[in-house]
Amino acid sequence: MIVCVHLPRFELVVAAGDRSEVVRRALSGRALAVGPRLGAEQRLGEVSGTAEACGVAPGMILGEALARCPELLLVSPDPVRVHETWEAAIGALESIGAAIEPASPGLAYFESDGLRGIHGTDAGTIAAARRALDRHARVGAGPTRFCALAAALAVRSRRPLVLDGEEAQRWLAGQPVELLRHREETEELLEPLARLGVRTLGERRKLGRGALADRFGAPGMLAQRLACGEDSPLRVRRVAERLEEMLGVGDASSGAALKRVLGVLVNRLLARPERRGRPLRAVMLSARLAAGGGWRERVVFRQALCDRERIWLALSVRLLLLPAPAAALGLSVEDFGPPASEQRALFDRDPVRPAARAARLREAIAQMRAVAGRDAALRAVYIDPDSRVPERRVMLAPIPE
């Protein structure tokens, strides 16, 4: 059984933090929203329930949101604190023995079948997860990830909603089609389905797999599978070492002085014994802003590096994107390259053997995944070459790691 843990409005709650004035206004029923990030497109983040009642939605353009709700109070986004708080929450869930798939900040999944030997029953596992989080969370459980998400979103109390077997499919058929908004692949289907008059997942399922594939292609087939209670297996994250350094900058909040602080962080990170001589493939550059809030920028190097000067040059350019003077600067490792002993010369006089070529190809695939995600490198697998529907002839499958 899949368990979904949903922390409502996680980014908004963390961004408000301990700001007493913001909390007081929230408790008084004022409309709140996470403001747009500095230097980015002027779109809102998460919004409070009062703002939703006024017609404000996440992702809405700031001007339109203020026109609908003039008394809207904007909270400065703080991606650094959101990341730290979410990592702490995931660590708490992993402490009960769960293998977590973090979907987004405030939303995570894990499988409870392997935890029954530790916590007894599924109810005991859910109770252990609640105790580990030590904060209000909506919990739902079902046979698939999508069903568990629908159950967690429907919960309005501390009592979890657990669905199983045919009961889950019957319950899912009566849920609104807006649940497809929570999957990136099917979000674009909401508008055409509304024009067709489809309101529930049950009505969506009656359209048929063939009609949906002809009209919407792969997203339509995925939506049909979700409405029928089918979904892909969990993709749990790999437990990795966390190497990070944070340093207060004092008066060196910008310019050349901030670059010298960055050099100190690079030296500290490379000197950590946990690195064990491995080069850095991807890092996360973050900053706490002096005016409040935070800033994060992921940097993927063209090749795995362990040279201090080259790393510093690549990161110092990104400091120009800093939207405001910084109060603290941080640097953490996102992904490591192969050990130095496994690296080969770029120009080798000897002919490249098949094993060496395969090793270099694996390294190239790993570099591509570090840049664009785990699904960036795919291979074509023929399923039904004689089909008239192009989407049925060939399927893209991930390359094994």
Image (cartoon, rainbow, N blue to C red):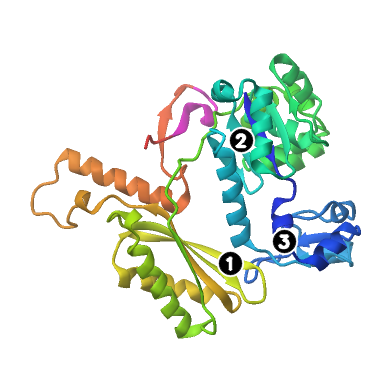
Residue, x 42% and y 56% (percent of image)? 243
Give coordinates of residue 148: x percent, y percent. Answer: 68, 30
- The residue where tag 1 is placed is 295
Name the spot of residue 150 as percent of width and height, x first.
73, 32
* Point 69% across, 37% down: residue: 130
Instruction: Name the residue type under label 1.
Output: Trp
User: Decide: marks 3, 1 in contact (CB < 8 A)?
Assistant: no
Q: Looking at this rendering, what residue extends furthest in the top direction?
A: 166
In three-dimensional space, the C-alpha distance between marks 2 and 3, rounded to whole angstroms, equals 25 Å
In-front residue for pair 361/76: 76
Instruction: Give the side of residue 97 with respect to residue 36, left or right.
Output: left
The residue indicated by pointer 3 is 17
Image quarter in which the N terminus is found: top right
Do the CB atoms of the residues marked 2 and 3 lie less than 8 Å apart?
A: no
Instruction: Say whether residue 211 is visible.
Output: no
The disc placed on residue 109 is 2
Q: Mark 1 vs mark 2: which is more N-terminal?
A: 2
Q: Quadrant of residue 192?
A: top right
